[in-house]
Amino acid sequence: MSAALALRGVTVGVPDGGGVRILLDAVELEVAVGEVVAIAGASGSGKSTLLAVAGLLRRPDAGEVEVAGIAGAGLSERRRGAIRSEHVGIVFQSANLLPSLTSLEQLEMVARIRGERGAGVRARARKLLAEVGLEAHADQLPSELSGGERQRVGIARALMSRPSLLLADEPTAALDASLSAEIAALLVATTRERGIACLLASHDEAPLASADRRLELFDGALREPSPLRG
Amino acid sequence: MFLALRDLRRGWRRFALVGLVVGLVAMLSTVLTGLADGLVRDGTSGLRALPITHLAFAPHSEAVFSRSTLDERALRRWRAVPGAEATPIGVSFVNAAPVGGGRSIDLALFGVRNGSFLARESEGIHGSGLNGIVLSSELREEGARLGGRYRIGGPTAAALRVQGFTFGGSYGHVSIAFVPLSTWQRIAYGSPGGRFSAIALRLPPGVDVAAVDRAAGTETKTKEAAYDGSPGFSAETATMTLIRAFLLLISALVVGAFFTVLTVQRTQQIGLLKALGASSWFVLRDGVGQVAMVILAATAVGAAGGTAVIAALDGGSVPVALLPGNILTGSALLVAAGIGASLACFRRITRVEPVISLGAQP
Ligand SMILES: Nc1ncnc2c1ncn2[C@@H]1O[C@H](COP(=O)(O)OP(=O)(O)OP(=O)(O)O)[C@@H](O)[C@H]1O
Ligand SMILES: [Mg+2]
């Protein structure tokens, strides 16, 4: 299996008082097509930063990031944006929907950013909403949806661009345990069905438990989870 | 504009205030345009109605009649231009006292030569030769009557009979009156003959004005350029231009400040759009497009309101003029100023990092 995402020697330092704190220390990671990798770690350990680097939202201070085989770490913001809109779907904590768009329009927006429009886009958006079980909520605004429904829209939106890599930062943080399990299951099922890769960061048990591989970010490095923290 | 349109439709309330301010500014600007145009038109209406194309003044008089004196030599030179018509005109400000007492009137007195095209073609003079005084029709409201008699230049001056009424024109906001050139010369210089303020010209196209000016010792202006010399004209236009410039500035500042606040409020949303792959340019286009729609609509409504105010004032005691071209230009400038001010936010939008969408620090 080829890697949908590869991080090689990724290093990120952040200003800390007068000095620099190494948040990610030469991190190595490969996520294969069809694989779900979950990252746990204490708050402030750098999980979001790792995802940001993986999604080309942030440049690492050293190292390389390959998304769908394209080395992107050193590219301009514009180029990275283009790769992102082509290959990366992002599921955000508490969905991060645009308040003035309906569920359907959230998905159409992704297509607009990519310069696509028309009836085909609409049909595809409807189909994705149906896949996450929201066909009845297509014309509702985020304020009219429950937390779980919002996150389903968020997942459908991340899939709208037909990404090869799905990134999810605390996708269940705003949800209760049973919803959390539901959303985690949806993410995993989606990844496998489409044969894409998924890298997620979470504190919650449900997404961590359903992943194919589970890693912990500690002291700037990824490691197998410590048995103590089960 | 996908997002802009929907955001506007579902959240129009937050644009209501800025729309109201821009609309009011547009209304004020339109009313001021109407007043300024009215004032200018009123101050130059006497000149505007003269059947001429150009006026030749003495050199360095800057189109001010009271600074200009010409003589027959210059007139002969202009008469010699093929196809040109030239006739002397005297212009001065006087007061005329009704014979037998009563309130005297201010006049911009135009001395014209009997039988000249100025006399023939100016309303109220043609036909009978000019021998008394022909008043602006506005003076009827001040009690001037046909056959009434006025003295100009003190109780010993000869009385002039009101022979007719001409168009309701004024020069420098003073009502005009026509008298024979010889009468005007007696009033202005104490004796008839030889001198006058300027030469009224009707020139065919293609005349080398500068060359004739050199030969005649004159300084020729087109009729429109001669408005500049009418008393108060440049002060009025400068004042109105200044006020309108301030309005433009206010509008630009209001819209710019509004858009800045909007952009700051939308920082999270901009980060999200960028994380989804949108460029800064995409975000700017959407945001500025939205503000442009608001400004355009508000300006259109405000300008329409202002036009209605002017139309209501028209014909009353306040001089106004409805010149669609000027109103459109003013409104277009307001819209452009607003859009320009919002474009200034580009750097702010560029600086938003997509990484903030993850809740991580940039
Ligand atoms: N640009 C920056 N400047 C200063 N500090 C930064 C910067 N970026 C990240 N940090 C710090 O790095 C640490 C890791 O942040 P990050 O958001 O990646 O952690 P996290 O593991 O996602 O935490 P959480 O579980 O709370 O979401 C935090 O302490 C954060 O304050
Ligand atoms: Mg985080």
Image: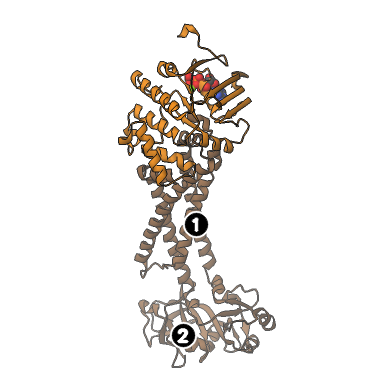
Quadrant of the rendered image containing residue A79 = top right
Residue A178: x %, y % from top left: 33, 19
- Viewer-nearest residue: B305 or B227: B305
- In the figure, the shade used to draw chain A is orange
Q: In this view, does A131 lie above or below B88?
A: above
Chain letter of the residue beneath label 2 in the structure image:
B
Residue B243 seen anywhere in this rendered image of the structure: no
Q: Where is residue B22 in the image (x, y as percent from the top left)?
A: 42, 51
Helix, strand or loop under label 2:
loop
Of the residues shown, which amino acid type is indicated by label 2?
Answer: Ser
Residue B264 in the image: above or below residue B189: above
In depth, the one of B237 and B334 nearer the eye is B334
Name the amino acid type tagged 1: Leu
Of callouts 1 and 2, which one flags the residue occurring earlier in the amino acid sequence? 2
Give the crowd class for mark 1: few <14, some 14-19, many >=20 residues within 10 Å: some
Chain B color in figure = brown
Asked if residue B78 is positioned above or below residue B62 in the image, the reply reads below
Q: Mark 2 points at which residue?
A: B122
> Do we see residue A1 in this rendering?
yes
Q: Is mark 1 within 8 Å of ligand 1?
A: no
Spatial distance from mark 1 to mark 2, Cα to Cα? 39 Å
Q: In the rendered image, which residue does mark 1 sit on? A: B333
Color scheme of the displayed model: by chain
Q: Which of marks 1 and 2 is in front?
A: 1
Residue A84 lies, in percent from the top left, at 53, 34
Q: Hey, which residue is sitting farthest left in the picture?
A: A136
Q: Name the secondary structure under disc 1.
A: helix
Q: Nearer the viewer, residue B301 or B94?
A: B301
* Identity of the residue drawn at 46% across and 93% down: B129
Which residue appears farthest toward the front when viewing the image? A1
